[in-house]
Amino acid sequence: MLLESLVLPVLGGILGVIGAVGYALRPSNSTIPQTSAMLKYLPMFYILLNIFMLLHLPFRYTLNTYFGLIETVIALLLIAICLSVIASLRRFFEFDLSKVKDILIYGSIVWLMGKETHAWGLHTLAEMVIFSLSSLVAIFSLYLFYQIRKTGVFFIEKDELIHLLFPIAFFFGLGILGEGIEIIEMKEAFFAVVAVLIAYVFWIIYRITKPLLE
Protein backbone atom coordinates (compact mmCIF):
# COMPACT_ATOMS: atom_id res chain seq x y z
CA MET A 1 0.00 0.00 0.00
CA LEU A 2 1.43 3.37 -1.02
CA LEU A 3 0.51 5.12 2.22
CA GLU A 4 2.37 2.55 4.30
CA SER A 5 5.35 2.13 1.99
CA LEU A 6 6.04 5.76 1.12
CA VAL A 7 3.98 8.48 2.79
CA LEU A 8 4.16 7.25 6.39
CA PRO A 9 7.96 6.83 6.42
CA VAL A 10 8.34 10.35 4.97
CA LEU A 11 6.02 11.78 7.62
CA GLY A 12 7.91 9.81 10.26
CA GLY A 13 11.16 11.39 9.11
CA ILE A 14 9.58 14.85 9.19
CA LEU A 15 8.23 14.22 12.69
CA GLY A 16 11.72 13.15 13.76
CA VAL A 17 13.26 16.34 12.38
CA ILE A 18 10.64 18.52 14.09
CA GLY A 19 11.19 16.63 17.33
CA ALA A 20 14.93 17.34 17.12
CA VAL A 21 14.24 21.05 16.49
CA GLY A 22 11.87 21.25 19.45
CA TYR A 23 14.35 19.43 21.65
CA ALA A 24 16.94 22.08 20.78
CA LEU A 25 14.85 24.91 22.25
CA ARG A 26 16.10 26.23 25.57
CA PRO A 27 14.98 29.17 27.74
CA SER A 28 16.47 32.46 26.54
CA ASN A 29 16.57 33.74 30.13
CA SER A 30 16.19 32.44 33.66
CA THR A 31 12.43 32.96 33.63
CA ILE A 32 10.54 30.06 32.14
CA PRO A 33 7.03 31.12 31.09
CA GLN A 34 3.94 29.46 32.47
CA THR A 35 2.84 26.78 30.04
CA SER A 36 -0.73 26.19 31.22
CA ALA A 37 -2.08 27.37 27.86
CA MET A 38 -0.02 24.68 26.15
CA LEU A 39 -1.32 21.89 28.37
CA LYS A 40 -4.17 21.47 25.90
CA TYR A 41 -1.65 19.93 23.52
CA LEU A 42 -0.77 17.12 25.95
CA PRO A 43 -4.03 15.13 25.79
CA MET A 44 -4.28 15.76 22.06
CA PHE A 45 -0.77 14.42 21.46
CA TYR A 46 -1.17 11.30 23.60
CA ILE A 47 -4.68 10.48 22.37
CA LEU A 48 -3.35 10.52 18.81
CA LEU A 49 -0.38 8.40 19.85
CA ASN A 50 -2.77 5.99 21.54
CA ILE A 51 -4.93 5.59 18.43
CA PHE A 52 -1.86 5.14 16.23
CA MET A 53 -0.59 2.36 18.48
CA LEU A 54 -3.99 0.72 18.54
CA LEU A 55 -3.78 0.40 14.77
CA HIS A 56 -0.26 -1.01 15.07
CA LEU A 57 -1.07 -3.78 17.53
CA PRO A 58 -0.95 -7.34 16.09
CA PHE A 59 -4.70 -7.68 15.55
CA ARG A 60 -4.69 -4.73 13.13
CA TYR A 61 -4.27 -7.19 10.25
CA THR A 62 -7.80 -8.47 10.79
CA LEU A 63 -9.28 -5.03 10.16
CA ASN A 64 -9.72 -2.96 7.02
CA THR A 65 -7.14 -1.37 4.75
CA TYR A 66 -8.16 2.21 5.53
CA PHE A 67 -5.90 2.14 8.57
CA GLY A 68 -2.99 3.38 6.48
CA LEU A 69 -4.95 6.54 5.71
CA ILE A 70 -5.92 7.00 9.35
CA GLU A 71 -2.29 6.57 10.44
CA THR A 72 -1.21 9.13 7.84
CA VAL A 73 -3.74 11.65 9.15
CA ILE A 74 -2.59 11.00 12.72
CA ALA A 75 1.05 11.51 11.73
CA LEU A 76 0.12 14.84 10.13
CA LEU A 77 -1.75 15.90 13.27
CA LEU A 78 1.22 14.95 15.47
CA ILE A 79 3.43 17.11 13.26
CA ALA A 80 0.92 19.97 13.54
CA ILE A 81 0.85 19.70 17.35
CA CYS A 82 4.65 19.76 17.61
CA LEU A 83 4.83 22.78 15.30
CA SER A 84 2.17 24.56 17.38
CA VAL A 85 4.13 23.97 20.58
CA ILE A 86 7.33 25.22 18.92
CA ALA A 87 5.49 28.33 17.72
CA SER A 88 4.23 28.95 21.27
CA LEU A 89 7.69 28.52 22.80
CA ARG A 90 9.78 30.46 20.31
CA ARG A 91 9.08 33.85 21.93
CA PHE A 92 10.69 32.71 25.18
CA PHE A 93 13.13 30.09 23.99
CA GLU A 94 16.10 30.13 21.66
CA PHE A 95 17.51 27.51 19.35
CA ASP A 96 20.61 25.67 20.62
CA LEU A 97 22.34 23.82 17.79
CA SER A 98 24.42 21.77 20.22
CA LYS A 99 21.26 20.11 21.54
CA VAL A 100 20.43 18.95 18.01
CA LYS A 101 23.82 17.27 17.94
CA ASP A 102 23.08 15.70 21.31
CA ILE A 103 19.77 14.16 20.30
CA LEU A 104 21.25 12.90 17.03
CA ILE A 105 23.98 11.21 19.04
CA TYR A 106 21.35 9.68 21.34
CA GLY A 107 19.46 8.43 18.31
CA SER A 108 22.59 6.90 16.81
CA ILE A 109 23.45 5.14 20.06
CA VAL A 110 19.92 3.73 20.38
CA TRP A 111 20.00 2.48 16.80
CA LEU A 112 23.42 0.85 17.25
CA MET A 113 22.23 -0.83 20.44
CA GLY A 114 19.19 -2.10 18.56
CA LYS A 115 21.41 -3.53 15.82
CA GLU A 116 23.61 -5.27 18.37
CA THR A 117 20.86 -6.77 20.48
CA HIS A 118 18.59 -7.92 17.63
CA ALA A 119 15.64 -7.79 20.03
CA TRP A 120 13.09 -9.36 17.68
CA GLY A 121 9.55 -8.90 18.89
CA LEU A 122 10.49 -6.08 21.27
CA HIS A 123 8.46 -3.61 19.21
CA THR A 124 5.22 -5.46 19.98
CA LEU A 125 5.79 -5.13 23.72
CA ALA A 126 6.82 -1.50 23.26
CA GLU A 127 3.68 -0.79 21.25
CA MET A 128 1.52 -2.28 24.00
CA VAL A 129 3.28 -0.17 26.64
CA ILE A 130 2.94 2.97 24.52
CA PHE A 131 -0.74 2.21 23.91
CA SER A 132 -1.50 1.59 27.59
CA LEU A 133 0.47 4.45 29.11
CA SER A 134 -0.49 7.01 26.47
CA SER A 135 -4.14 6.34 27.41
CA LEU A 136 -3.38 7.05 31.06
CA VAL A 137 -1.30 10.14 30.28
CA ALA A 138 -4.11 11.50 28.10
CA ILE A 139 -6.69 10.96 30.88
CA PHE A 140 -4.52 12.50 33.60
CA SER A 141 -3.51 15.46 31.44
CA LEU A 142 -7.16 16.12 30.56
CA TYR A 143 -7.99 16.10 34.26
CA LEU A 144 -5.07 18.40 35.03
CA PHE A 145 -6.07 20.81 32.28
CA TYR A 146 -9.65 20.79 33.58
CA GLN A 147 -8.48 21.59 37.13
CA ILE A 148 -6.31 24.45 35.92
CA ARG A 149 -9.15 25.91 33.88
CA LYS A 150 -11.53 25.46 36.81
CA THR A 151 -9.39 26.89 39.61
CA GLY A 152 -7.02 29.17 37.70
CA VAL A 153 -4.12 27.67 39.65
CA PHE A 154 -1.07 26.47 37.75
CA PHE A 155 0.20 23.23 39.24
CA ILE A 156 3.37 22.67 37.21
CA GLU A 157 6.56 24.42 38.21
CA LYS A 158 8.60 23.09 35.31
CA ASP A 159 7.80 22.84 31.62
CA GLU A 160 9.14 19.28 31.50
CA LEU A 161 5.86 17.76 30.39
CA ILE A 162 5.74 20.00 27.33
CA HIS A 163 9.39 19.52 26.42
CA LEU A 164 9.15 15.73 26.62
CA LEU A 165 6.86 15.86 23.60
CA PHE A 166 9.89 16.53 21.44
CA PRO A 167 12.17 13.56 22.23
CA ILE A 168 9.08 11.33 22.08
CA ALA A 169 8.22 12.79 18.66
CA PHE A 170 11.85 12.36 17.56
CA PHE A 171 12.15 8.67 18.46
CA PHE A 172 8.58 7.85 17.45
CA GLY A 173 9.05 9.48 14.05
CA LEU A 174 12.27 7.59 13.43
CA GLY A 175 10.57 4.37 14.52
CA ILE A 176 7.91 4.91 11.86
CA LEU A 177 10.66 5.68 9.36
CA GLY A 178 12.51 2.49 10.30
CA GLU A 179 9.36 0.42 9.84
CA GLY A 180 8.72 1.98 6.43
CA ILE A 181 12.21 1.30 5.12
CA GLU A 182 12.16 -2.17 6.72
CA ILE A 183 14.94 -1.71 9.24
CA ILE A 184 13.28 -3.69 12.01
CA GLU A 185 15.96 -3.10 14.66
CA MET A 186 15.56 0.64 14.10
CA LYS A 187 11.83 0.43 14.80
CA GLU A 188 12.32 -1.86 17.81
CA ALA A 189 14.97 0.31 19.45
CA PHE A 190 13.21 3.63 18.91
CA PHE A 191 9.78 2.37 19.98
CA ALA A 192 11.37 0.93 23.13
CA VAL A 193 12.80 4.36 23.97
CA VAL A 194 9.40 5.96 23.33
CA ALA A 195 7.83 3.47 25.77
CA VAL A 196 10.39 4.40 28.46
CA LEU A 197 9.86 8.14 27.88
CA ILE A 198 6.09 7.82 28.12
CA ALA A 199 6.47 5.81 31.32
CA TYR A 200 8.49 8.73 32.69
CA VAL A 201 5.82 11.20 31.54
CA PHE A 202 3.17 9.12 33.29
CA TRP A 203 5.17 9.14 36.52
CA ILE A 204 5.52 12.94 36.35
CA ILE A 205 1.87 13.66 35.62
CA TYR A 206 0.66 11.12 38.16
CA ARG A 207 2.84 12.74 40.82
CA ILE A 208 1.36 16.13 39.93
CA THR A 209 -2.27 15.03 39.88
CA LYS A 210 -2.19 12.62 42.84
CA PRO A 211 -2.85 15.36 45.46
CA LEU A 212 -5.85 16.50 43.41
CA LEU A 213 -7.33 13.01 43.47
CA GLU A 214 -7.11 12.60 47.23
Image: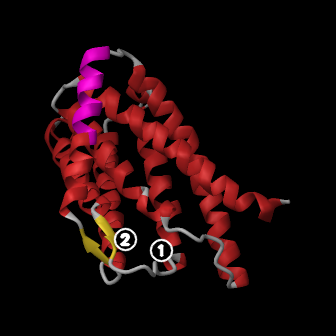
Quarter of the picture holding the C terminus: bottom right
**How far across and down, in percent of the image, does residue 163 sit?**
42, 62
Which callout, 2 or 1, points at the residue further toward the start of the chain? 1
How packed mark 2 is, by other alpha carbons closer than 10 Å (few <14, some 14-19, many 20 or more), is many
The residue that appears at 34% across and 41% down in the rendered structure is 67
> Is disc 2 placed on a helix, strand or loop?
helix
Foreground pick, 131 / 58:
131
Q: What residue is pinned by disc 2? A: 85
Tell me, for residue 38, which label it has, or none.
1
* CA neighbours of label 1 inside 10 A, class few (<14), some (14 to 19), many (20+): some
Element type where label 1 sits in the image: helix
Kind of residue sitting beneath label 2: Val
Is 1 in front, or is 190? 190
Q: Which residues are magenta?
A: 106-117
Residue in the picture at 25% in, 57% down:
99
Residues marked 2 and 1 touching at CB (< 8 Å): yes
Vertical placement of residue 58 versus 107, above or below: above
Q: Residue 56, image x and y in percent?
A: 40, 34
Name which residue lies at 15% across and 39% down.
2
Residue plotted at (67% across, 65% down):
143
Depicted 124 relative to depicted 35: above or below? above
**Residue 200 falls within the magenta-colored stretch:** no
Residue 184 placed where, x, y %?
25, 23
Q: Is residue 137 above or below residue 39?
A: above
Q: CA distance from mark 2 to mark 1?
A: 7 Å
- Is residue 90 among what the camera can see? yes
Q: Which mark is residue 47?
A: none
In this view, the residue in front, 113 or 120, is 113
| Dominant secondary structure of the residues highlighted in magenta in the image | helix
